[in-house]
Amino acid sequence: MSHQIEIVGRDFEVTDRIKEYVTKKVEKLDRHLSMIDETRIELAHVKSARSSIDRYVAQLTVRGKGFILRAEERADDIRAALDVALEKLDRQAIRYKGKHFNNRGDGKSAAEVVAEDTEVLIELENEEPPVIVRRKQFDLIPMAEEEAIEQMKLLGHDNFFVFYNAETGTVNVLYRRLDGTYGLIEPRVR
């Protein structure tokens, strides 16, 4: 194992068997991205879920130099949620590796790259690239954060609301979290 793995339980007891299971599965991510610094796994049991299918939540965050990959899944069993989330992360790692390392002078011949990733390429070929199907423009009116929450509720926006923060003078994104609270994204230009 070449990176740090942190396992956190929220309303969920993380047993040694689950730690062992998670560690064994997460170590396999190294085969695609060797420069992973840390992996954080949050496991939760949501008693108030609308459906029993959504009771267990596995949220995985992988950090490395210059990248962050994240996946979250819900299932009726914690291992099932973990497996599906790990599959998503695995695909993200393959996609990231393909975009940033293949055909960039990494010292491997084309034959070596093809031999390693033949199965992966077949999977990626079947995926369609994301397409922007709608563009929308709107006027931003300066408002306070509390006013933005009210506007979000009045407009019936359940997931997010973009507004111009009068207090900070920046464009912010207000979003509703799964637990019913709100989050605020305050972008910075570097």
Image: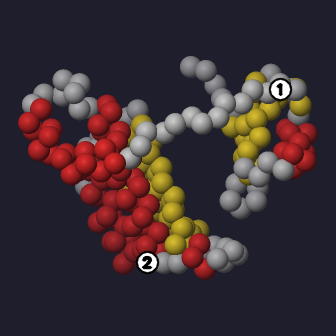
Q: Is residue 19 above or below residue 151?
A: below
The residue lying toward the viewer, choosing from 137 and 63, is 137
Amino acid type at image mark 2: Thr
Q: What secondary structure is marked by label 2?
A: loop
Q: Dot 2: within a 10 Å radius of its alpha carbon, few (fewer than 14), some, or many (20 or more) residues? A: few
Q: Is residue 98 above or below residue 94?
A: above
Residue 36 shows in the view: no
Q: Residue furthest top?
A: 190
Q: Image quarter for residue 180?
A: bottom right
Q: What secondary structure is marked by label 1?
A: loop
Mark with earlier residue (1, 2): 2
The residue at 34%/53% (across/down) is 90
Q: Which residue is mark 2?
A: 15
Asked whether the residues under the numbered discs 1 and 2 touch, taking CB atoms below 8 Å apart as contact, a structural biologist would say: no
Residue 61 percent coordinates (x, y): 46, 51
Q: Which residue is mark 1?
A: 140
The residue at 31%/44% (across/down) is 125
The residue at 77%/52% (across/down) is 158
